[in-house]
């Protein structure tokens, strides 16, 4: 599938609970899927629809193209589907293996899938200066209550925060693009940490109807 370009729809209801987060545990209603062992992971709720999504390997700090990982679909027109990606568990700034969850809404049918996201150390990062010896003692990092963010689909995502790395802003980036004669809105919900790092926690792509030209008043 041709890569669908940048960024995210819709109104995401955002709830950052800090002081009261301990009293309200996060709710995780993501679908249960089998472990990601292959290069492409697929699961759907109907037997005649097949969606193939590639696993992703990305360097620390790089923004991930979750939509571009969609390889193909059988018995479904991607251009007529709403695509939703919950990537709230993917920390693109910390090496590790994560899972992203995809939902396709196609003519009233829901298809669910996932893929594996592997974040690796950036090989181009500057090597530390081992000749310099620092006597400074790093301040002890304290745990903060997790930030709870309600996503568009109702999932309450729990984002880990500490005294050294915590969320200072949530924001949505949106853009329109053309694909196969259709107009799409690509929207991403992002969080900004005090360290300057950003993380995409939700992506939604929807086809939008072109506006009809205004009728010309009759004399």
Image (spheres, rainbow, N blue to C red):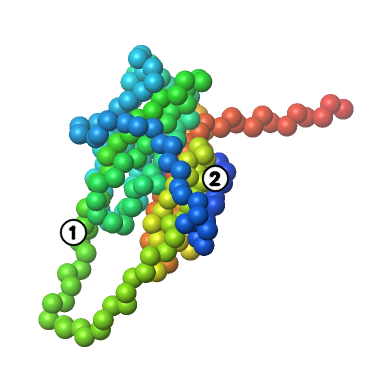
User: Quick one: SS at disc 2?
Assistant: loop
In this picture, is 139 found above or below 210?
A: below
In this picture, is 201 found above or below 34?
A: below
Q: Quadrant of the N terminus?
A: top left
Q: Give the camera-side residue of 23 and 19.
A: 23
User: Quick one: SS at disc 1?
Assistant: loop
Residue 201 image offset from top left, x and y in percent: 42, 48
Answer with left or right where residue 11 lies relative to residue 94. right
- The extreme bottom residue here reads 135
User: Dot 1, crowdedness within 10 Å: few (<14), some or many (≥20)?
Assistant: few
Q: Which mark is residue 190?
A: none
Residue tagged 2: 12
In this picture, is 39 found above or below 141?
A: above
Q: Residue at left 52%, top 31%?
A: 207
> Which image quadrant for residue 77?
top left
Q: CA distance from mark 2 to mark 1?
A: 35 Å
Residue tagged 1: 123
Who comes first in sequence, dot 2 or dot 1?
Answer: 2
Q: Residue at left 38%, top 44%?
A: 87
Q: Residue at left 32%, top 74%?
A: 140
Residue 52 image offset from top left, x and y in percent: 30, 27
């Amino acid at each position: 599938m041709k890569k669908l370009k940048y960024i995210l729809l819709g109104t995401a209801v955002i709830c950052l609970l800090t002081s009261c987060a301990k009293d309200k545990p996060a709710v995780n209603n993501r679908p249960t899927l089998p472990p990601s062992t292959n290069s492409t992971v697929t699961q759907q709720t109907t037997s005649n629809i097949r969606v193939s999504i590639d696993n992703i390997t990305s360097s620390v700090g790089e923004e991930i193209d979750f939509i571009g990982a969609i390889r193909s679909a059988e018995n479904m027109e991607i251009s007529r589907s709403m695509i939703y990606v919950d990537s709230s568990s993917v920390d693109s700034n910390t090496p590790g293996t994560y899972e992203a969850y995809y939902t396709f809404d196609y003519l009233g049918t829901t298809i669910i899938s996932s893929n594996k996201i592997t974040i690796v150390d950036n090989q181009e990062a500057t090597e530390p200066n081992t000749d310099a010896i620092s006597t400074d003692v790093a301040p002890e990092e304290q745990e903060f209550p997790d930030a709870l963010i309600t996503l568009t689909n109702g999932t309450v995502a729990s984002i880990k925060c500490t005294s050294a790395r915590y969320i200072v802003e949530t924001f949505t980036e949106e853009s329109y693009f053309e694909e196969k004669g259709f107009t799409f809105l690509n929207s991403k919900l992002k969080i900004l940490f005090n360290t300057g790092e950003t993380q995409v926690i939700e992506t939604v792509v929807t086809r939008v109807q072109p506006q009809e030209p205004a009728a010309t008043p009759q004399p």
